[in-house]
Image (cartoon, rainbow, N blue to C red):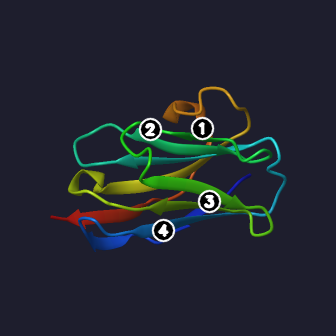
Amino acid sequence: QVQLVESGGGLVQAGGSLRLSCAASAGTFSSYVMGWFRQAPGKEREFVAAIKWNFAITYYADSVKGRFTISRDTAKTTVYLQMNSLKPEDTAVYYCAAKRTADRHSVPSAYGYWGQGTQVTVSS
């Protein structure tokens, strides 16, 4: 059983930065994909970024490419999402997720493990 705990959300002005963290319970993650998703009120959960744990291969949604960076610390079994140049439309609850296989990394239903979410609010 994988447990994920997010932190780092908050209120920031447009153009600012935040770094989200996702601490995973101890275990073997070499074959895992870790993803970040977000959900704004009244909208479906959408893919933000993902990383293959073993080779650190990364994927991004077009809407965040060039602004957000996903990374991982293998010693701390923690995944980060560095968010720069934030926009009001980035406002959402951000969720960390994990899955055992590399396929469908942008599909929420493909992930079996989820954190509780952390709120990110970007004011204009």
Using residue 35 as the reference point, say whether residue 13 is left or right of it: left
Q: Secondary structure at mark 3?
A: strand
User: What's the mark number on residue 111?
Assistant: 1
Gap between marks 1 and 2 measured at Cα: 17 Å
> Which residue is disc 2 drawn over?
61
> Which residue is disc 4 drawn over?
19
Confirm or deny contact between disc 4 and disc 2 (CB under 8 A): no
Q: Residue at x 39, y 48 (%)?
A: 38
Q: Residue 39 at what x, y percent from top left?
A: 34, 47
Gap between marks 2 and 3 measured at Cα: 22 Å
Gap between marks 4 and 1 measured at Cα: 22 Å
How crowded pointer 3 is (Cα within 10 Å; few <14, some 14-19, many 20+) is rated as many
- Which of marks 3 and 2 precedes in the sequence? 3
Confirm or deny contact between disc 3 and disc 4 (CB under 8 A): no
Q: Identify which amino acid the numbered label 1 is placed on.
A: Tyr
Gap between marks 4 and 2 measured at Cα: 17 Å
Closer to the camera in the image, 122 or 29 = 122
Pick out the residue farthest to the top: 103
User: What's the mark number on residue 86?
Assistant: none
Using residue 33 as the reference point, say whether residue 35 is left or right of it: left
Confirm or deny contact between disc 1 and disc 2 (CB under 8 A): no
Q: Residue at x 44, y 38 (%)?
A: 61
> Which residue is disc 3 drawn over?
4
Q: Residue 111 at what x, y percent from top left?
A: 60, 38
How crowded pointer 4 is (Cα within 10 Å; few <14, some 14-19, many 20+) is rated as some
- Look at discs 1 and 2 and give the one toward the viewer: 2
Q: Please tell me in which quadrant of the rendered image residue 78 appears.
A: bottom right
